[in-house]
Amino acid sequence: MKNRCIYIMIFSLLFSYNSIDNCQYYEEIESMEYLLNERIEIMNEFLYGYKDMDSLEKKLDKIEAQNLLENDLDILYKVIDNPTDYELALNVEVDKIHSLEKTDNGLHINADLKWLMSGYDGEFSMVKNYNITCVELEKQMYLASLVILNN
């Protein structure tokens, strides 16, 4: 009886430790998922709707900064000249955070992102590892870099 109680306490301790670890970055995860999903919505609106570059740039400028904003705009300018079919990103969520480093002006995150996609064969999900940089400017968080590590 005593051993069973000890095992239950150890199990509870391990389970609670894992739960605490997953909730440790709740605010950062929520902010990052919001920004990434806003990015998806803005880009889908552009790719599958009216291609207004001025509107696109204004919307992306509200959630992106630095290299990511420049790269996204460059890619989307090329889409206008070379239209093709793309798989549609529907949603993204953080699957697992491997590391998170807070800096003076933002965050450096290595995380697995789970993408919900739609293609010719229907909906599917995929998990990819990314290095993500977020910067804080005037008390607002922006996506600054999104680099895929496993392709």
Image (cartoon, helix red, strand yellow):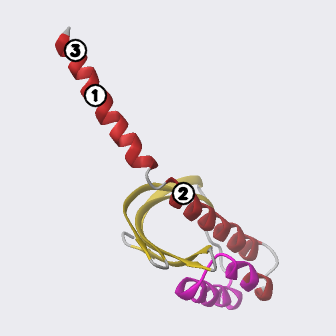
Q: Quadrant of residue 72?
A: bottom right
- Placement of 24 over or under 6, stated as above or below: below
Boundaries of the magenta span = 57-83
Is residue 25 shown in magenta?
Answer: no
Give the Cα separation between the discs numbered 3 and 2: 37 Å
Q: Amino acid at mark 1?
A: Phe
- Residue under the point 27% across and 24% down: 9
Q: State the residue in front, 34 or 55.
A: 34
103 above or below 15? below
User: Image quadrant of residue 87?
Assistant: bottom right
Q: Tell me the SS state at disc 2.
A: helix
Disc 2 residue type? Glu
Residue named by callout 2: 27
Q: Which residue is mark 1?
A: 11
Q: Please identify the dominant SS of the magenta region.
A: helix
Neighbours of disc 2 within 10 Å: few (<14), some (14-19), many (20+): few
Residue at position x 62%, y 74% in the image: 139
